[in-house]
Image (cartoon, coloured by chain):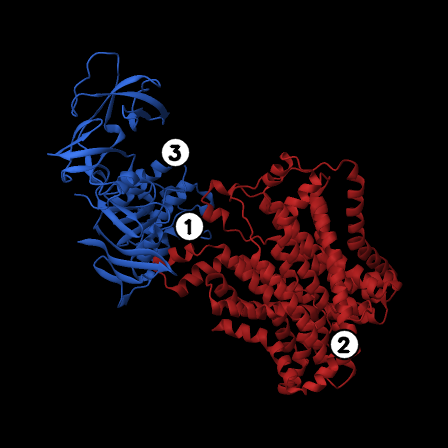
Chain colours: A blue, B red
Amino acid sequence: MSALSVTGAVKSFGRTAVLCGLSLDVAQGSIAAVLGPSGCGKTTLLRILAGFETPDAGEIRIGGRTVASPSAWVPPERRTIGFVPQEGALFPHLSVRGNVGYGLGRSRDRAARVLEVLDLVGLAHLVERMPHELSGGQQQRVAVARALAPRPALVLLDEPFSSLDAGLRADVRDVVRAALCADGATAVLVTHDQEEALSCADLVAVMQRGRIVQADDPITVYRAPRDLDVAAFVGEAVRVTATFSGGFAETEVGRLALREPRPPDGVGVALIRPEQFVVVDRDGGAAPKSDSGPAVAATAGQQSFLGHDALLAISLASGAVVTARTLDPGPARERPIWLSVRGPVNGYVREGSSQRW
Amino acid sequence: MPACVAAVVAVLPLGYLVVVAARADPAVLLAQVVRPRSLLLLGSSVGLAVTVTAVSVVLGVGAAWLIERGALRGRRVWGVLAALPLAIPSYVAAFSWISAVPEIAGFTGAVVVLSLSCFPYVYLPTAAALRRLDPAMEEASRSLGVSTLATFWRITLPQLRPAVAAGALLVSLYTLSDFGAVSILRYDTFTRVIFTSFNASFDRTPAVVLSGMLVLVTAVIVIAEARTRGRARYARLGSGAARLSTCIPLGRMRVPAYGSLGLLAAASLGLPLLTMGYWLSVGRSGEIDLPRIVEAVGGSLVLAGGGAVVTMLLALPVGLLAARYTGRIPGLLERATYLGHAVPAIVIALSLVFFTVRYAIDLYLSVPLVLFAYAVLFLPLAVGSVRASAAQSPPVFEEVARSLGRAPRQVLRTITLPLAAPGIAAGTALVFLAAMKELTVTLVLHPTGMDTLAIRLWSETFTRSYAAAAPYAALLMLVSAVPTYLLGRDRRRTGGLPDPTQGAPATSGTYQTFPDPGSYAYDQAGKR
């Protein structure tokens, strides 16, 4: 059963259309990441789910109950949702205990539940602190605990990690993900950071221009993006002109196997991820064999060192430039190299096409 | 709905004045307006307002630049000294000047006293704007080979314009509606003549006509102010600690700089304090009537305390509404409560007199009527502080609270009001102190036999028994010094806050209850 189901949601502010018939389904107990560039309407979507905004059209069901439709409207306090805003927004006049217990009312197990959810985020020892006595990461974790405390049907997180610095971000992300899983919560988080979406979520929904253009598991979204726009948004994408025939793409960098679903035979664009390129120093001798047939001769160009790996620009014989990911320090500038491609690639009929064949 | 009550309260006095004017014979009204005396008054009032505004701008901007940008010793002390004249009600300053230099009465005296009382309205927002200004812009200008002075003219001043304009318009508004100082200095403006003609005759037409003319003049100024505010864009720096701008060495100009600031402080603070001290020491020889002073303090406390509570109760719904909803109706309601800000106190007092005499004679010269008048006068002060403190806690708190299953009414009780509490308390205190100092409305409407500090000071000065007036002047100065002191303390505390970027900005950065000095000056205009 879907914990959340959005059908044809439409919302505009004045003359600006923000959501244009958006649909999304999230399964019970899973974490969905809505991934999109700034200004694509992610936050509006979240606010509509929470009930802070009303959709102009469409239907929203949370836990099987219709909370917004042309004929029904449930206010935020009766939607059984948990909301984690961008910077936590802990109530500054309440202690950690007061914050986390805020949504629990006067139930008997209140104190126990407060400690239970704080334990999930690893902060049970800070229960008497005031918000300003916590670090940014701790505040964020308390905010998640506060949202989880009343056992909501759905937890909504609005770019929850973007205000943290890079070192802290991964830690807090792991803690929050583990807490959500341990509590069996269904969660929707919106983010513009593809690494966050791919690493955190069970379902990545790519949002563009007010619609979800692809919603799949992270591996499928990265390996088999629906179109070239999605491909470029979820990671580095190299496009090369190709001629498709019989399940292969003939390109300047070799004869590449095509992943399903294959494009029809004809001219198009092949999508290669930079890590698929294999770069070998060329010291004379014959071209080494590879998945893509004999390696092609090329010239190393500018290298951008990124720490964990590096991106190397490579000039092909035709003058076209492609980008390869290299682990060790790559060949020096202007060095002749052999270039080949590992694994299957995706073929698209034409650049920018929204339809995949 | 409760917000509407406040709006009705605020609109009633002016509304009634319009009704009275509309019912009168237009020919009689017109005859009154074009009387040479009326036109002369228009000239003298506007002339005074323009002169005082110009002098205040020069004093305020000059002091702000010297204190914020000049390499002076004791900047903090100079900053406090430049704000302190706000702590002296203008009629107290007028008392001290005329008792020290009797020949100053008239236009000169009015200009001197009002300029020295009002220049902080320009100084405070200008200094605040200078502090907020990104020093990188001035540095960029200097690096392009432009001199200090030229940089000030071409880069700094244009950015200060909204702050200076807001301050200047406050000064002119204050000058036009001031009643105490011009009366004591015996310079005829609208307010003084309205009061005397109301006191002297049974025919209320001249008072109504002059009130109407005065309201029109202030309306022009308020509209002008609203326009400059609407166009002004306040660039906010990042949430991190603002970089302090470097000081400009004054070189040979150091002596004139210290000299002019010292002269300003001596004239605006030293002289009033000295004369007061003199009269107090003279008065020790028997003219001080202690039981009377105690009685006046009691009267002031009752009226100001009641006024503060009534005003805040009316202001709460309007302030909360205005902080949370932008729309035609909340905007209109808020505007309505600001009428008390724009309409001179003498006009409000007069129209309440007419209203009660005609419709509610039991309320005429009663305590409830004074409290009502205070509410009209000080609603802007209270609404402003409620609104500001509610607006400083971002709406996301309320959204989170609702997502956690609390209904709007509970959210108001558990989140919105506790977060706004410091601002509400500060607003109540501000209204209380402003009401303590209030002269005009209290003078016209107070129940017979009830005394307050301001009334005693006014009547003793009126009969030129300056020694007897001095204790009241001293007490009033003490009362007025409290908010100024609090303002200074708050600003020091803001400076000592930890770097807000260390915590989550939404909680430690945005949630502050410290008033902006600029808006404080704006609020203070409620005191008349």
- Quadrant of residue B9 within the rendered picture: bottom right
Frontmost residue, B335 versus A9: A9
User: Which residue lies most toward the left here?
Assistant: A246
Please say if the residues under marks 1 and 3 sit with CB atoms less than 8 Å apart.
no
Q: CA distance from mark 1 to mark 3?
A: 22 Å
Frontmost residue, A106 versus B503: B503
Q: CA distance from mark 2 to mark 3?
A: 74 Å
Amino acid marked by disc 3: Gly
Q: Nearer the viewer, mark 2 or mark 3?
A: 2
Q: Nearer the viewer, mark 2 or mark 1?
A: 2
In the rendered image, residue A184, in percent from the top left (x then y), is placed at 23, 47
In the displayed structure, does residue B24 sit left or right of residue A82?
right
Q: Disc 2 on helix, strand or loop?
A: helix
Please give the name of the residue rendered at 50% of the width and 57% of the height, measured from the top-left corner: B391
For label 3, count other residues whose C-alpha is less than 10 Å away and answer few (under 14), some (14-19) or many (20+). Answer: few
In the displayed structure, does residue B18 sit left or right of residue B3?
right
Chain bearing mark 2: B
Judging by the rendered image, the residue that carries numbered circle 2 is B38
Please give the name of the residue rendered at 64% of the width and 77% of the height, measured from the top-left corner: B369
Q: CA distance from mark 2 to mark 1?
A: 60 Å
Judging by the rendered image, the residue that carries numbered circle 3 is A167
Frontmost residue, A130 versus B333: B333
Amino acid marked by disc 1: Leu
